[in-house]
Image (cartoon, rainbow, N blue to C red):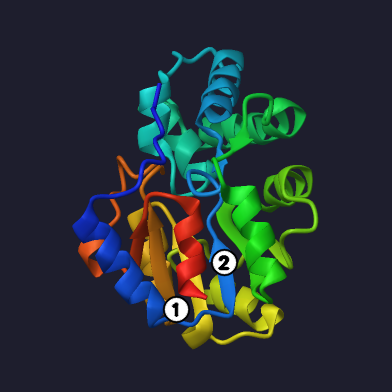
Amino acid sequence: MLQFSFAFPIAGRRKWTEERGGDVGAKAFVFDMDGTILHTLPDLTVVTNKALAQMGYPLRTEHEVLTFVGNGAARLVGQACPSQATDEERQRTLELWQRIYLECGDNLTAPFPGIVDVLRELRARGAKTAVLSNKFDAAVRELSDHYFPGLFDVSRGEIPPIPRKPDPTALLQVIQELGATPADTVYVGDTSVDAEVARNAGTKIVGVSWGYDEALPMPIDELDGYIHDARELLTFL
């Protein structure tokens, strides 16, 4: 089981984050979902194993599922299936996974500490907020409404044929809907996919230390900020 700590960072890292944050002056914040604002890994593991069991496949550990997270449900399920599974079987497993997720995919899910309060404060100070995830769109909207009612101006998941992150198309659309520009937007995420989509869209990128980046590690030295406490996001306004 992952352990999440919100202890303040070491002095050098904290100073580095505050110095960069003070130069941003962001008006809009777009958030990744899994591993950034919501701790979903326990539910992702349960749902994945229920789908695998119905297909007669071996189950996966939570650590294995962690290494599959970051590029959408199709890739998660594809990696969770045994290597000998056919494309048709992987698609059937994905359809099962999505149905199960909508039925019981948030029983163990919870916002990370401080996120809800920070979102309220960002909005109270006039910032626009959105969530953009590689999770399928119906789940993103349902989770946003349930855990963050009224706290996002836009909630968006994967909607084919729009390509998933790190392609910048969806992020640029969200920024336009917010009435913002890439230059005054911060994308907040936990993996290298998030850093790449921010670079591709021309936004700033802030990484979080509590996320799911084991398989897709965040390139910390390339970020505009790296936070250990959600409240540090306020320095980027």
Label 1 or label 2, whichever comes before in sequence order: 2
Up/down of 68 relative to 198, above or below: above
The residue shown at (60%, 56%) is 118
The residue shown at (55%, 30%) is 44
Q: Quadrant of residue 178?
A: bottom right
Pick the residue in front: 70 or 52: 70
Amino acid bearing label 2: Val
- Horizontal side of residue 187 vs 63, given as left or right: right
The residue wearing badge 2 is 30
Q: Position of residue 12 (x, y in %)?
A: 19, 59
What crowding class fits label 2: few (fewer than 14 Cα within 10 Å), some (14-19), or many (20 or more)? many
Q: Residue furthest front?
A: 11
Please, what secondary structure does the residue beneath circle 2 have? strand
Please, what secondary structure does the residue beneath circle 1 have? loop
**Label of residue 203 in the image:** 1
Q: Position of residue 100 (x, y in %)?
A: 69, 27
**Label of residue 171 in the image:** none
Pick the residue in front: 122 or 43: 122
Picture quarter with the N terminus: top left
Amino acid bearing label 1: Thr
Up/down of 226 relative to 69, above or below: below
The residue shown at (56%, 13%) is 53
Up/down of 134 relative to 139, above or below: below
Q: Quadrant of residue 195?
A: bottom left
The residue shown at (68%, 53%) is 137
- Horizontal side of residue 35 vs 47, given as left or right: left
What crowding class fits label 1: few (fewer than 14 Cα within 10 Å), some (14-19), or many (20 or more)? many
Label 1–label 2 contact, CB within 8 A: yes
Cα separation, mark 1 vs mark 2, equals 10 Å
